[in-house]
Amino acid sequence: MEVKELSKEEFDNLFKKHILGSFYQTSAYGTLMSKYDYSDLYIGIYEEDKLIGGSLILTKTISLNVKYGYAPRGFLLDYFNESSFKEITKVLRKYFSKKGYAFIKINPIITYSEAFPETNTKNINEMSVKLISNLEDNLYKKLKDNVYFESVLPKYNPIINLKSFNFENLDKKVQNKLNKINNKGLNLIKGDIYNINSLFELIKRKEEKSSDFYKSLYKTFNEKNMIDLFLVEVDYHKYLENLQDDHNTETTINEKINKVFQLDPSNKAIYREKMNSDKKLDQINREISELNIKIHNGIYKEIIAGALIIKYNNIANIFISGFNKNYNKLEPNYYLHYMLLNYYKNENFNFMDLNGITGDFTSTNPYKGLNDFKMSWRPRIFEYIGEFDFIINRTKYSLLWSTKALHKEFEKQGLKVTD
């Protein structure tokens, strides 16, 4: 058994259909991260000239002759073949020890459980329980199970089966929101690298990354046709036209209710109808006034939501999305996600990964709003086995942690709670 270095093209061709593959294990991601403090290494693991595994390894030098590696979403190999996995581990440790590595971090896409928040239960995969024990026996140190977003990549991911996705299966509250959105003048438009700055204004509060990072991300993945940028635009002329139609309809309803109320002013049911109609009419009038001011000031359209989607095999992955909270009443986030789900369903993708949620499904979760929004699309929620540090050199590994050299690398604070 031996480890061989591969070219980017070789790596992509050999592992593009791997069962544990993801866009994180591609040369596109490696190329991107090579621009941000890492170097990218591609390896194949061979047994008698037969390929049995491999990985993209992102490498960073911490101090003189000491470095660490990161295999985003884990090595691509058969973790459940205990004897083979043990031999692979030995070969990898020997190979990377010679290169001065202290450890390699992995976080495989291997399901530990399927979570059911509504009943606060989990369906645990017993094979994964045994795998975790086997990993630890082979000097893969299991890190704490972060409930929120402290780890490098999310531990809980909501996945939607696009083949069975349809409007009728959505929660009634979501259906009502989407029905109300129809007359708000919203449009989904496909952008390109020249729209990154518009997107960045919507997502910059989420993570401490620059607009240049997202430009590099788009450019790198776009070279392989692996990324889409979508924006939600509100057209104020169209919105105003729809509001005026609503105003005419509600005015007619209001006049009829008032006539009935004048005939029977003590009727509480009619009074409630009158108050609701008055309130609705007042809201429409205020919105019309706001739109007229915008149009008078020469503002005819605005970008209020957007997302970057990375495409890999049959999965559309929402890498990041955001919206302008000043336009909450237009429900741009619901519109964006509904349109994306339908777009990729029509493009014959099998799944959409909504990106991470937290493992805290209580009412006190500071990220409850984020969780509730993503769960409102009725995804299946998969909990992965988590993060492990594959220890190459115990002495160097212990030294790095004891001197806190790695704290700034991996002790994430999570997303901002306001998201």
Image (cartoon, rainbow, N blue to C red):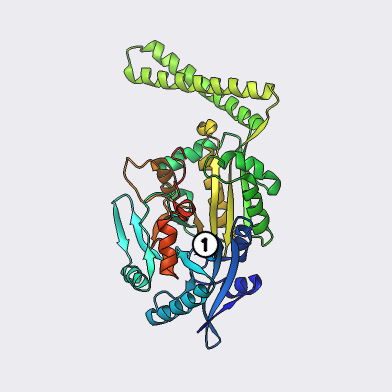
Above or below, 272 against 178 in this view is above
Locate residue 174, reporting x and y percent.
44, 42
Above or below, 279 against 125 in this view is above
Q: Amino acid at mark 1?
A: Asn
- In this view, the residue farthest toward the bottom is 48
Front one among 12 and 100 = 100
Q: Is residue 161 visible?
A: yes
Tell me what residue is drawn at x 49 percent, y 17 percent. 255
Tell me what residue is drawn at x 63 percent, y 45 percent. 211
Q: Is residue 187 visible?
A: no
Locate residue 8, reporting x and y percent.
64, 70
Q: Quadrant of residue 125?
A: bottom left
Tell me what residue is drawn at x 44 percent, y 51 percent. 411
- In this view, the residue farthest toward the front is 64
Front one among 151 and 119 = 151
Badge 1 element: loop
User: Can you identify the residue that label 1 sits on?
Assistant: 350
